[in-house]
Amino acid sequence: MQKGSIRVQTENIFPIIKKFLYSEHDIFLRELISNAVDATQKLKTLSSIGEAKGELGDLSIVVSIDPEAKTITISDKGVGMTGEEVDKYINQVAFSGAEEFLNKYKGQNENNIIGHFGLGFYSSFMVSDKVELVTRSFKDAPAVKWECDGSPEYTLNETDKESRGTDVVLFINEESREFLEPSRIKTVLNRFCRFLPVPIFFEGEQVNNPTPAWTRKPAELTTEDYQAFYKELYPFNEPPLFWIHLNVDYPFNLTGILYFPKIKQSFEIQKDKIQLYSNQVFVTDEVKDIVPEFLMLLQGVIDSPDIPLNVSRSYLQGDPNVKKINNHITKKVADKLEEIFNNDRAAFEEKWENLGLFVKYGMMTDDKFLEKALKFHIMQDASGSQFYTVDEYKTATGDLQKNKEGKQVIIYSTEPVQQDSYIKAAIDKGYKVVKLETIVDAAFINQMEMKWNDVHFIRVDADIADNLVDKQEGNESVLTKEQEEKLKKLFEQQAAGLHLTVEVKGLSKDAAPVVATRPEFMRRMKDMAAVSGPMGSFYAGMPDEVTLTINGNHAIYQQILSQADDDQQKKMTHNLADLALLSQGLLKGAALTSFIERSVELLGKQQTEKEEVAG
Ligand code: ADP
Ligand code: MG
């Protein structure tokens, strides 16, 4: 019989461990099962090189609860330990690790540190009054039992154990009784052990899938396999759009499968995040820094033993492997998108509604991605009939949409239904209008104008069609200066809650009599303000800026100007202004009501006038 004191300077390490690890006690199970898995894998390796003789037999790990004795036992049939090994690995190494760990990370709170500093085994004391370890090595040596009650004293004795392997018995302490509930253990197993590589049993049932899809060779997997694995991860989701199987072994190790989910609205609260594993042990689903920001909406798993899980977030950011992994993922995603775009453009276009979000985020946040994305970023024609890359759009629109500064003007609509009349007017001029209607597009447009210096975006209703590409000078109307001034005055009276600018132009006779447009700059500011913080409220509070362009060549103005009845004249112009505002969606509430009433009144008048003429 050996008695001893665990060699560690810090007098009583256990209270510190308990306190330090307070937030996530359930990690003990991950640690003990990881050890059991390691021991089993070691045995397999030794067997394969002939160092462990004979049949290995069943290698599954069993977790069990004894509610009477108030114990949890984790049993494996792995390499086991001899008495000397227990002394070395449990008494000495584990504790030197613990010390190092404490010195280095005092005051921090990072649960993932445990495994990496050999504190793994000792995490069992977070939930136990006493721990027993009964083990028998695959080597020819007597079985031993190690016992420790949480003080630095332990005992180590020879004992009887027939079979090879290790049983760790935890005598669960008062505060941790919850872990004696099978449902609680199941939850923990599900979280941490779901994809461990050795079969694990709890209450007679296997709880893990030891060969999840990401650990298999891409060539062996079918579409169904990938979809089935997605379903295994996220049982309630719609099938994914597509996936990327990551498989790298140089200059770092990384495997995994990333799925593109069906997401139409960005910023849906994301509940199904990418899960990070280290050799099939679940580590976290906080993958910030490892996965590029714009791909945070992806789902699936990443498994890398090279990600330093033992350190805090700030360290992670500076870690060269993390940076490399991040770059690699970005490149892989870009390559995959390009591949689909080239091989099956129709399928790509069909998925664009969902994909566009990722692609645009990527283009805004990552210049390397932007460069690659130019090949597959597309814009849909407002009619829905066609998609263009930016280059294709430039070719299709040619000089017609090149402005004086030599920039290609991309005319877009944020709401094709609402902006129908503007789109028609632009199409009549031979322009091509694309849809940019998602929530990211406002920011996207701003950023792309800065990054690409040869394009300029303008919303289809930002100006009259004649002015979309370049402001046209001249455009004299048939009206006299006095008539123009008179009309301006009449229109300027109709500014309810809006900031109106009125101009008279000589447009074609068939063009609309008056068009309301919203100058690009102010409108963008307001759009951005609507989704941004405090600076935004300044713009958000400003009245909507609207330009009314009166087409002086339209016949209706001759009629209005020749009206003898002042009141009638006012009402007619008011109605014209309202119609224009209506097409901008800016006529609401009381203004809309009075527009309707006025229209009815005017129609009635027209009727009586006709009758008078007839009579
Ligand atoms: P780590 O797993 O990081 O090495 P641990 O504290 O978890 O640190 O374990 C310390 C050591 O104890 C292990 O490296 C291993 O040598 C030994 N050990 C722990 N559990 C077992 C087990 N179930 N079977 C065999 N050896 C084990
Ligand atoms: Mg361990």
Image (cartoon, rainbow, N blue to C red):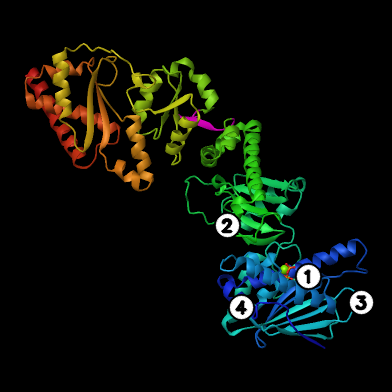
Q: Residue at x 66, y 47 (%)?
A: 325
Residue 32 position in % (x across, y down): 71, 72
Q: Earlier in the sequence, mark 2 or mark 3?
A: 3
Residue 220 position in % (x across, y down): 77, 48
What distance separates the C-alpha of mark 4 from that of mark 3?
36 Å
What distance separates the C-alpha of mark 4 from that of mark 2?
29 Å
The type of residue carrying mark 2 is Arg
Helix or strand or loop: what does disc 2 sit on? helix
Q: Earlier in the sequence, mark 4 or mark 2?
A: 4
Residue 377 magenta-drawn?
yes
Q: Is residue 283 left or right of residue 154?
A: left
Q: Which mark is residue 140?
A: 3
The type of residue carrying mark 3 is Asp
Neighbour class for label 4 at 10 Å: few (<14), some, many (≥20)? many
Q: Residue at x 37, y 22 (%)?
A: 468
Residue 475 magenta-drawn?
no
Q: From what the image shows, is residue 506 above or below residue 264?
A: above
State which quarter of the image contains the C terminus.
Answer: top left
Q: Which mark is residue 313?
A: 2
Helix or strand or loop: what does disc 3 sit on? loop
Neighbour class for label 2 at 10 Å: few (<14), some, many (≥20)? few
Q: Is residue 551 left or right of residue 565?
A: right
Residue of label 4: 179
Helix or strand or loop: what does disc 1 sit on? loop
Q: Is residue 82 visible?
A: no
